[in-house]
Image (cartoon, grey):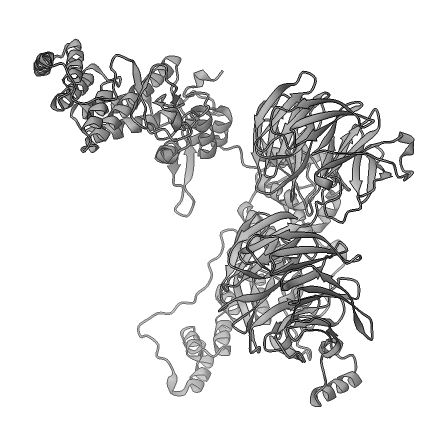
Amino acid sequence: MLTKFETKSNRVKGLSFHPKRPWILASLHSGVIQLWDYRMGTLIDKFDEHDGPVRGVHFHNSQPLFVSGGDDYKIKVWNYKLHRCLFTLLGHLDYIRTVQFHHESPWIVSASDDQTIRIWNWQSRTCISVLTGHNHYVMCALFHPKDDLVVSASLDQTVRVWDIGSLKRKNASPADDILRLSQMNTDLFGGVDAVVKYVLEGHDRGVNWASFHPTLPLIVSAADDRQVKIWRMNDTKAWEVDTLRGHMNNVSCVMFHAKQDIIVSNSEDKSIRIWDATKRTGIQTFRREHDRFWILAAHPEMNLLAAGHDSGMIVFKLERERPAFTVSGDSLFYTKDRFLCFYEFSTQRDVQVLPFRRPGSLSLNQSPKTLSYSPTENAFLLCSDVDGGSYELYCISKDGYGRGDVQDAKKGHGGSAVFVARNRFAVLEKSTNQVLIKSLKNEIVKKSALPVATDAIFYAGTGNLLCRSEDRVVVFDLQQRIVLGDLQTPFIKYVVWSNDMEHVALLSKHAIIIASKKLVHQCTLHETIRVKSGAWDDNGVFIYTTLNHIKYCLPNGDNGIIKTLDVPIYITKVSGNIIFCLDRDGKSRAMIAYLQQKGFPEVALHFVKDEKIRFNLALESGNIQIAVASATAIDEKDYWYRLGVEALRQGNAGIVEYAYQRTKNFERLSFLYLVTGNLEKLSKMLKIAEVKEDVMGQFHNALYMGDVRERVKVLEKVGHLPLAYIAASVHGLHDVAERLATELGDNVPSLPKGKVQSLLIPPSPVMGGSDWPLLRVMRGMFDGVFDNTGRGVADEEEYEAADGDWGEGLDIADVDALQNGDVAEILEHGEVAEENDEGGWEMEDLELGPEADTPKASIGTQSSVFVAPPPGMPVSHIWVQKSSLAAEHAAAGNFDTAMRLLNRQLGIRNFAPLKSIFLDLHTGSHSYLRAFSSAPIISLAVERGWTDSSSTNVRGPPALPFKLSQLDEKLRAGYKFFTAGKFTEALKTFVNILHTIPLIVVESRREVDDVKELIIIVKEYVLGLQIELKRRETKDNPVRQQELAAYFTHCNFQAPHLRLALLNAMTVCYKAKNLATAANFARRLLETNPTIENQAKTARQVLAAAERNMTDATQLNYDFRNPFVTCGATYVPIYRGQKDVACPYCTSRFVPTQEGQLCAVCDISVIGADASGLLCSPSQVR
């Protein structure tokens, strides 16, 4: 079993796979229904409306619906897009065990403990049939995947097959009057919708589950008698074929596998068992420690199964689907079914080389996992997991390809085997952790012990092996028996060498590590989706696949998506622009996403063929014509909406109108006609609203047009007579007002006195009906090259009518089912036929003139010289591209790259203290102007060192608000706080300086040295102040107080501050009767030549007192004779010669146990992190 996804939750009683998306529904005993993405491993949604356990759940195969049934006797139909229950079906009188949608009809079948099976129509929301006959709980009821049959299992020890053909015929539309008459008779005189076709008896206890075979006339059932039974049926009878015994407790669920000839069952004995359906024997058993299994589900299209148990569920595969393959030059060798096959890339010739015999034991995962090839000897090594790991060696002649002769293989045991030379291969012997070198006669030539505990070996060049252990890989030279390279990695699954063997890609489940041949690390990529395969192209770009993408990775770590995949593929070779995959070819340009990511979407646009990617690139580069063509090809609502937004931004009213028409967005269309002043089309929108019976739409359109009579008519139609009367009276429609007053009688509303009414007329637009004027621009170098290739002519025809009058095509034959781009008759004629027996709308044919008279629109044509100019590169992008200074990236608003630079240069990981500085840099390097009250604020970049003589085409670096002189002022303020004994304020000031320095920029080398010196000074004060504040907190430990006071004197302070620290330490130790230590501090104080006489006098007095009794009352962890630095986290001395680690930014020292922690002094960098050093000046960057 290959577990793909596992959840921990309450007991899972129901499961259902989504037919298309990587989703699974799990209904729980707690009453919650969970929706999981098993590919990403994330919980998407929870549905919690049932009261009590939910035992059945099922996805619809095409609609965004699922159905659930629970112990509250309710069946609920949910819309997962709307995240809510649509309706509830009531009728069952006891717990509901299973629910299932029909594959074609709008039906749901449900099984219940009330001993009935019900079939419901979920469109009419009614029960259309009740199947009675079981005399105990019905545990399961399922539709046949193709025929009009239902199978049910009950605790009355029977399985019943029901024929629902008459129900199908009854619900179909009768073709003639005779059928309609017979149906009426059936309804009147109690006809039978569903009849029992077979009753299958044979189980000794209650039956828990029964299901049909997807194609054959077979049924499999599972019961509390611990047996699984197989039944066969024909047109007249059904009979028991065989019984599968092996489960030790009640069998909960059983099913035929859709793609293999096997049966899968699970049981309350905590096991899942796999049975051979033809030989009727057990193949394999998977057990859990403590959890009973309750339910099984199979994916309708993929080779995936799911099982629910007491504490969650698992999604799993029974066998690996990845074929073993190897590439040699122009040849691909791969395994398919029971054959080794050969594929030639250049000629695309595909032949079977030889059949390899599978071992006779019945077990899964027998197929080869790896394949190794020696081209000179034409020898193959096939490795599999059979018997705990074994290999088969085949040597064949090249002219024997395709003959299909069964070769005798040389076999042996080993964890993995791989060729290491022309006629030598290595076999891993896991038990002794050594490698056996064998000849082609399968004889051992020599043995070699491996340097690490190895569980797999891979080829690493002639005579070399790449050995994999749990957390590292090693390149081992078999000849010299030395390690050539060593790299710590996650658990590696596949190894892909570049063509020149200079680079290697190590693929783990969710990561790709690129390294050199000696395993020098170059970059690591992390993926949330599983990595499946990869290959190097000729330019050193690594192309790889995940479950749903083809992607690329450059050696510098840049990566991106090339193509989205519907099914997983395995890349075998990349040659030029062609990616060869196993069993299918994929063609694409490897640099498309790279061009887009690096700011050249208009270049990438001309290389890509995928319409969705073309659409996104076209929007990004402002190419509205290609966006229209792609949106037409895709024809999805979301893409038309995004096209409308972009066209509106460019002021292309015609395309906006077309996009709104394609999505039938009538409200937006009406507003567009209002702002463009197109009253003619606005009147037609009024008629469309009338056809749709959209009252609010009618009223709004009448309001936009200033049509009072229409507004009064709408109000009167919906019964708002008082409002209709007021509208008619105010606007002078006295005849209408009198008629309404008569209808209202005594309820005529009074009008306010002394008010002068005015008619609401929409204002005339400044520019009516036409697009915004566009700037004349030069055509790009790529525009002409690709205009006439393949797609150009067809695309022009598709959106030829893209002018301001676009949209003569709305068709209102059935407004709710309007075909896209069809709103024609109403917008053209404005007339609607109202006499129609069937309730539809009859339209007259358009009487159009000759085609020659129709003016052609010019949006997509070659003669157009006006195109929307692409926006120039923002100054912030120029700043980012030209600079390696973190401060300038932050000023440009590119905080992500700024943080990456700071992490690389100074090991900074905690960016929270820098947030306000980042924001100040960004806002401080821009100025903001208001143009008009209705226009957005204009942001202008402020450049450093700009003068009137500066060139307008050359952009300077950003002006930054933080300067070195400001930090000098803050330093002096900190000194003042320190002298005054305001230690908390002093600490805040010094820490602020430490946080600002990484984002400071200076011009000269001398200033760089000043900045580095400032870091050392400030760091000493921060450490000292933290020690002193810690001492003041430690009131109940006099020994620790003295130690901290002592360490305080060893910080590198200015002379006046050092005297204060020495005086403090001397006082603390003297009071604690540690006279010898106090005398040491007095001596050091006198050596500084104190200028304050009082300090000198106190020191001399302490020295005199200590000389009479030179002893210490307590032993301190302090030796002033041995030079030391103080640990910035634990505040203990690190004496010279002892190991320590340092902060890469502030250079504070720490005991080795602090490595990897956040520096306690600067609070932003990681202790012991690799960092290149402070970069704060353009002069440092060559």
- Residue 1181: x and y in percent read 47, 17
Image quadrant assignment for residue 370:
top right
Q: Position of residue 764 (x, y in %)?
A: 48, 57
Which residue does the image show at 41% across and 48% down from the upper left? 934
Lateral position of residue 475 relative to residue 772, left or right = right
Residue at the image position 69 percent from the left and 36 percent from the top: 607
Seen from this angle, which residue lies furthest bottom? 189
The answer to whether residue 1135 is left or right of residue 243 is left
Image position of 372 with respect to 763: above or below: above
**Is 1173 situated above or below 941?**
above
Tell me if residue 16 comes above or below residue 781 in the rendering. below
The answer to whether 754 is drawn above or below residue 13 in the figure is below
Decide which of 1170, 772 is in the foreground and name it: 1170
Nearest the eye: 647 or 16: 16
User: Which quadrant would residue 1044 be assigned to in this image?
Assistant: top left
Image x and y of residue 1132, in percent: 29, 24
> Can the viewer see residue 808?
no
Residue 1144 appears in the rendering? yes
Query: Residue 522 occupies which quadrant of the picture?
Result: top right
Total marks drawn? 0
- Residue at 71% from the left image edge and 70% from the top image edge: 844
Residue 1140 horizontal side relative to residue 1078, left or right: right
Please provide percent x and percent y for residue 903.
45, 28
Q: Is residue 874 left or right of residue 652?
A: left
